[in-house]
């Protein structure tokens, strides 16, 4: 589930997760950014972060995370 991040051909998705510590619902909770490799039916978690510490993830950050993932997968 979640929402596709624009500009990534529905391969990079963002999921909002509520935090029990912060009473702002999903808006103030956590973000999970994942890569969906549709052809292989696999999902890879790229990063999880607290929205209170980081507002958004940049395209450059996603590119770096994908590069690291590709290096690990070989």
Image: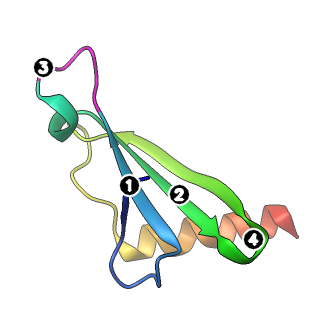
Q: Residues within 10 Å of mark 4 (few under 14, many from 20)?
A: few
Under circle 3, the secondary element is: loop
Residue 3 percent coordinates (x, y): 34, 62
Q: Which mark is residue 23?
A: 3
Which of the two discs, 3 and 1, sits closer to the camera? 1
Residue 1 percent coordinates (x, y): 44, 52
Which of the two discs, 4 and 1, sits closer to the camera? 1
Q: Main secondary structure of the magenta part?
A: loop
Q: Residues within 10 Å of mark 3 (few under 14, many from 20)?
A: few
Q: Which mark is residue 2?
A: 1
Residue marked by disc 4: 70
Protein image colouring? rainbow
Residues in magenta, as a range? 18-23
Residue depicted at 26% across the width and 47% down the height: 54
N-term mark: 3 or 4 = 3
Asked whether the residues under the numbered discs 2 and 1 touch, taking CB atoms below 8 Å apart as contact, a structural biologist would say yes
Residue depicted at 42% across the width and 75% down the height: 60
Under circle 4, the secondary element is: helix
From the viewer's perspective, is residue 14 above or below residue 30? below
């Amino acid at each position: 589930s979640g929402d596709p991040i624009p500009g990534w051909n529905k391969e990079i998705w963002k999921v909002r997760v509520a935090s029990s510590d912060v009473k702002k619902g999903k808006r103030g909770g956590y973000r999970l950014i994942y890569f969906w490799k549709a052809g292989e039916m696999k999902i890879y978690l790229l990063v999880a972060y607290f929205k209170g510490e980081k507002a958004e993830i940049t395209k450059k950050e996603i590119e770096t995370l994908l590069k690291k993932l590709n290096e690990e997968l070989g």
